[in-house]
Amino acid sequence: MKLQIEKAIYGGAGLAHQADGESIFVPFVLPGELVEVEIRQQKKNFEEASLLRVLKDSENRVQPPCIHFGECGGCHYQHAQYPAQVEMKVSILQEAMERAGLKTLPEIQSHAAPPWAYRNRMRLRLEEVGPTLRAGYNRRGTNEFLAIQECPITAPLLWRATQSLLQLATENPADRRWLSSAAEVEFFTTADEAKMQMTILVRKDQLGLTSLCERMRQFVPELVGAGSALLKPSGPQRQIQKPRPLESWGTQGLSYQVENEDYWVSRGSFFQINRFLIDELIRIVATNRQGLLAWDLYAGVGLFSRALTKTFQQVVAVEATGADLINSFKGTGRRAIESTTVEFLRNAVVQRERPQLIVMDPPRAGVGAEVCSLLARILSPEIVYVSCDPVTLARDLKMLVDAGYKLEELHLVDLFPQTFHLETIVVLRRQT
């Protein structure tokens, strides 16, 4: 079947239509291309196809540099020149806003950085393939293991550490025995690759991490801390069980410097993954904003909170799992609260509190209807919303606009080159 690709859609595919109007999603294509495809799966409102060949290619098509592209589930856009990737994401963001009913939009400002070797974190599966321990990802669209030989979107230190770990398993019988129960490994490094943490998830409780790390330091001196954690069996409803910490070696986290501020990131804690664009995120969120009081909701390790202390007399940082935040965000004009955003806002409404600025960086699910309703009652003059999902973002923005806010700025920050994922920062101001 021959199809003309009309546009890129959120999720990594290209959209085409059959003569009868049926929507077809095709991976690894670009807008304007003529392609030959084979229908792979029928869904309720669309069909998924496999790309057989490109009959007329786009001027933006390039040869993917990674040998695993197409098989690996991690990347979606390596076949596109990088400026074209950003253009596709701008179009996807624009359409998500319009589909939610947001018709009056500011111009989308895009922010990009080097599109390779940008990830400061890497999480890999470990599997025995014949007599050899291998590291890899999930094969695209499945839970099957795909052993890899490279990952060009990660910081070089992380792949060097992976190779060293596998080398130890090959050369040292004690390390091989210990790693035979390992299911996953995660590496996290500072922006300059000077220091690194390692977490290994294992299937059975056993000792051996310390000796492994001491040997690994001979190859990777940047390793300053590591931990092992026991994977628990799934519950009766196949609930995701949090791994139980076992051994620990070295430091418990890393001091990550951004905009001349040091952030303590405990092993396993969330932190933005693009080591080239974290400074830009802070500049967009915090520059030219000042006042008496600012709230940083879903604050994480306080990435935005610290920047805001430079121009606000008091900054309140709110995080549901806020142990790191409470320990590090101290001093005059700084207050860290361990609470869900909903509970914090409910109390703030009762107390009639009103900050000059609210910053919020929720997880992929967005903030939701109740938070939007509470924000509408608090009447803060300015809200900065940071999002990693354009669909849930657009849904929440529509509720805030209906409650009296106006979209003033719309920024697309490409934290995830070579993938369909995108980060958005929106500035909203209260209409008087």
Image: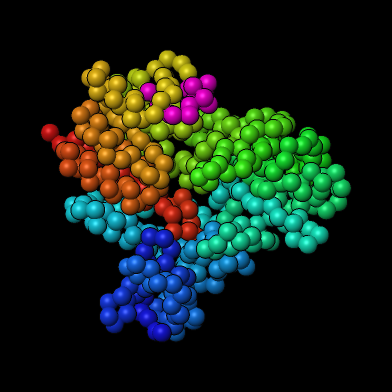
Q: Residue at x 53, y 30 (%)?
A: 263
**Residue 31 at least partly seen:** no
Render colour scheme: rainbow
* Range drawn in magenta: 316-329
Comparing 136 with 237, the one in front is 237
Please check the rendered image and state whether residue 175 is part of the magenta-colored stretch, yes or no: no
| Above or below 102: residue 320 | above
Q: Residue 11, position in %: x, y? A: 41, 60
Comparing 235 with 94, the one in front is 235
Q: Residue at x 65, y 52 (%)?
A: 125
Question: Residue 358 vs residue 75: left or right?
Answer: left
Please check the rendered image and state whether residue 321 is part of the magenta-colored stretch, yes or no: yes
Q: Quadrant of the N terminus?
A: bottom left
Q: Residue at x 74, y 56 (%)?
A: 128
Q: Quadrant of the C terminus?
A: top left
Question: Residue 117 vs residue 277: left or right?
Answer: right
Q: Residue 166, position in %: x, y? A: 76, 52
